[in-house]
Image (cartoon, rainbow, N blue to C red):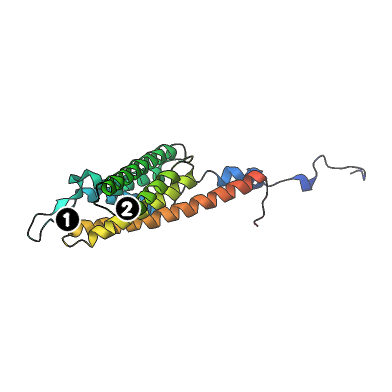
């Protein structure tokens, strides 16, 4: 072999096939969302609790399911929207996220409107302004683009509201077993949505690092 011979390919330019794949192609598409192990069963169980006997009007009376009272449906329907959004593919979860946003907006308007009417009628004092403030805040936080982080964050807040309602109902004097199951399901939904939010925030950070071309963590 001639001493002046040089190989046509520099060995240092050889890159393993695993490194050829762009980082964004491996981190942005996330096939496994482990939060589904909690958000899916908790969400649908919460919806099912609408039809379970939850409350009596007297100690010897019959227990009624909350489905008979439409004005208390939103805390339970949150479970369906969260379960659908959390288990959808990235292209479809935005649709269910918008549905969740609309449910919160309608509930917020209904809450604020009813509080204002009660105050005008003299049935409620200035403390009603706190409820109105919560309604306005709930309406405002849903006025955003339904990215996964936004949907997960709003889902966590909605689940917390459902948990507060079902927990208060379970402490009612004539509450029965359906109210307790609903509180447990809503509590599980809170944990699941917080898990989802953490996963979504992590995925967004990794995607930004991939887009910037940086491979080191800071």
Observer-nearest residue: 36 or 74? Answer: 74
Label 1, label 2: how many angstroms apart (C-alpha)? 25 Å
Crowd rating for badge 1 (residues with CA inside 10 Å; few <14, some 14–19, many 20+): many
What residue do we see at 41% from left, 41% from top? 97
Residue 15 location, x and y as percent?
Answer: 71, 46
Observer-nearest residue: 177 or 166? Answer: 166
Looking at the rendered image, the quarter that the N terminus falls into is top right
Q: Which mark is residue 128?
A: 2
What residue do we see at 63% from left, 46% from top? 210
Label 1 sits on residue: 55
Looking at the image, residue 52 sits to the left or right of residue 27; the answer is: left
Q: Reading the chain from its start, which is encountered first: label 1 or label 2?
A: 1
Residue 195 location, x and y as percent?
Answer: 44, 55
What residue do we see at 14% from left, 51% from top? 64
Looking at the image, residue 86 sits to the left or right of residue 72; the answer is: right
Residue 155 location, x and y as percent?
Answer: 40, 49
Observer-nearest residue: 128 or 153? Answer: 128
For residue 114, above or below residue 63? above
Looking at the image, residue 86 sits to the left or right of residue 166; the answer is: right
Crowd rating for badge 2 (residues with CA inside 10 Å; few <14, some 14–19, many 20+): some
Looking at the rendered image, the quarter that the C terminus falls into is bottom right
Residue 125 location, x and y as percent?
Answer: 29, 54
Please tell me whether mark 1 or mark 2 is closer to you in this view: 2
Residue placed furthest toward the right: 3
Q: Is residue 58 visible?
A: yes
Q: Which mark is residue 41?
A: none
Q: Quadrant of residue 77?
A: top left
């Amino acid at each position: 072999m001639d001493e002046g011979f040089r190989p046509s390919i520099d060995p240092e330019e050889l890159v393993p096939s695993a490194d050829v794949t762009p980082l964004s192609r491996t981190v942005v598409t996330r096939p496994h969302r482990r939060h589904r192990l909690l958000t899916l069963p908790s969400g649908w169980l919460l919806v099912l609790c609408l039809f379970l006997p939850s409350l009596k009007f007297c100690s010897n009376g019959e227990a009624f399911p909350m489905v008979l009272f439409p004005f208390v449906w939103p805390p339970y329907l949150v479970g369906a929207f969260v379960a659908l959004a959390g288990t959808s593919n990235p292209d479809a979860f935005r649709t269910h996220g918008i549905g969740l946003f609309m449910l919160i907006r309608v509930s917020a308007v209904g809450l604020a409107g009813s509080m204002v009417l009660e105050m005008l009628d003299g049935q409620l004092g200035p403390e009603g302004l706190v409820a109105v403030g919560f309604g306005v805040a709930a309406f405002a936080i849903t006025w955003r683009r339904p990215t996964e982080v936004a949907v997960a964050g709003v889902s966590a807040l909605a689940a917390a509201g459902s948990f507060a309602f079902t927990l208060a109902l379970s402490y009612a004097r004539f509450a029965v077993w359906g109210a307790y199951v609903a509180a447990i399901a809503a509590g599980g939904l809170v944990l699941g949505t917080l898990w989802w939010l953490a996963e979504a925030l992590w995925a967004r950070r990794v995607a930004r690092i991939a887009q910037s071309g940086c491979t080191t963590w800071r």
